[in-house]
Image (cartoon, rainbow, N blue to C red):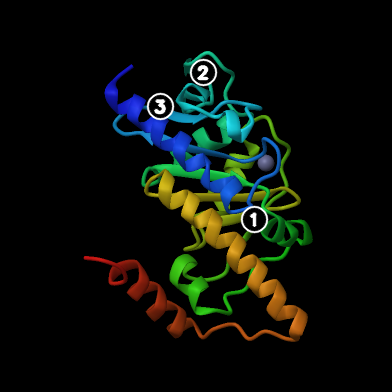
């Protein structure tokens, strides 16, 4: 195993701690993966390992079909989905998956989260779309994720009656998108409980998205 892969396993292990910390997962659900740069490989959480027992050994190396390449534990049952995303979306370097409560409630309801607040325009560039229902186990979920994200700017998709998949240039960006997705899912739900909500104008969304993606933060 190269130093780069060892480092990536440690990074992805550390990032997993953000999921329970942000209240996005219950028990062993949820997972994060990262593409191994320059290889047809990824690192992903092993199946069924509790978050407080997670170490770099529990982040296994797989091919992009979800097959185990290196590690002593079986990969997450979502490995084929993550691999499909990496195969189809070459710009993606990290993927996260959760069943976080508010976002998944929208997914269960089968409704896209409308872009009604500036933070959503910043991060997602529009609505967070709903993807099709698919059974776990083969590549059907991956096809649904890729097909839906290809038609939207959003880095998050609500898979119908299931949960959230997010993508990023790297695993940290994917985890951030999962945290932000749950945050806006909760806020828009609360706003709607007060009454009707008003989607932002398209040109305002474009301006916010452009500024946040290109200008915001430390140079
Ligand atoms: Zn799931």
* 3D distance between C-alphas at marks 1 and 3: 25 Å
Q: Name the residue under label 3.
A: 41
Q: Name the residue under label 1.
A: 158
Mark with earlier residue (1, 2): 2
Q: Which of 55 and 6 is in front in this view?
A: 55
In the rendered image, the vertical position of residue 173 relative to residue 65, given as above or below: below
* 3D distance between C-alphas at marks 2 and 3: 10 Å
In the rendered image, the vertical position of residue 3 relative to residue 125, given as above or below: above
Looking at the image, the residue that sits furthest to the front is 52
Mark with earlier residue (1, 3): 3
* 3D distance between C-alphas at marks 1 and 2: 27 Å
Assign a secondary structure to mark 2: strand
Mark number displayed over residue 24: none
In the rendered image, the vertical position of residue 138 relative to residue 71, given as above or below: below
Q: Quadrant of ligand 1?
A: top right
Image quarter (top left, top right, bottom left or bottom right) of the C terminus = bottom left
Instruction: Give the left or right position of residue 168, taking residue 65 as reference.
Output: left
Q: Where is residue 216 in the image (x, y as percent from the top left)?
A: 31, 71
In the rendered image, the vertical position of residue 86 relative to residue 107, given as above or below: above
Assign a secondary structure to mark 1: strand
Circle 3 packing at 10 Å, graded few (<14), some (14-19), many (20+), is many
Q: Could one spot residue 87 in this view of the protein?
A: no
Q: Mark 2 points at which residue?
A: 68
Image quarter (top left, top right, bottom left or bottom right) of the N terminus = top left
Q: Position of residue 54 (x, y in %)?
A: 55, 29
Assign a secondary structure to mark 3: strand
Q: In which quarter of the image is residue 210?
A: bottom left
Q: Residue at x 43, y 43 (%)?
A: 94
Mark with earlier residue (2, 3): 3
Q: Which residue is drawn at 59% across and 55% down?
A: 157
């Amino acid at each position: 195993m190269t130093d780069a892969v060892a480092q990536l396993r440690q990074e992805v292990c550390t990032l997993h701690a953000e999921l329970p910390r942000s209240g996005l997962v219950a028990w062993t659900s949820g997972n994060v993966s990262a593409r191994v740069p320059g290889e047809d490989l990824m690192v992903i959480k092993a199946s069924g390992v509790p978050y407080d027992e997670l170490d770099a050994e529990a982040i296994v190396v797989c091919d992009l079909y979800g097959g185990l390449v290196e590690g002593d534990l079986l990969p997450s049952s979502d490995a084929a989905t993550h691999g499909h995303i990496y195969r189809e979306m070459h710009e993606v370097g990290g993927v996260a998956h959760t069943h976080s409560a508010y976002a998944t409630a929208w997914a269960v309801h089968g409704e896209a989260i409308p872009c009604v607040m500036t933070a959503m325009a910043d991060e997602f560039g529009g609505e967070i779309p709903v993807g099709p229902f698919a059974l776990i186990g083969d590549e059907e979920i991956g096809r649904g994720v890729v097909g839906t994200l290809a038609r939207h700017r959003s880095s998050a998709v609500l898979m119908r009656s299931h949960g959230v998949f997010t993508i990023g240039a790297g695993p940290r960006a994917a985890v951030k998108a999962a945290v932000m997705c749950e945050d806006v899912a909760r806020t828009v739900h609360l706003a709607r409980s007060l009454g009707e909500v008003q989607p932002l104008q398209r040109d305002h969304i474009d301006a916010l998205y452009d500024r946040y993606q290109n200008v915001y933060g430390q140079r």
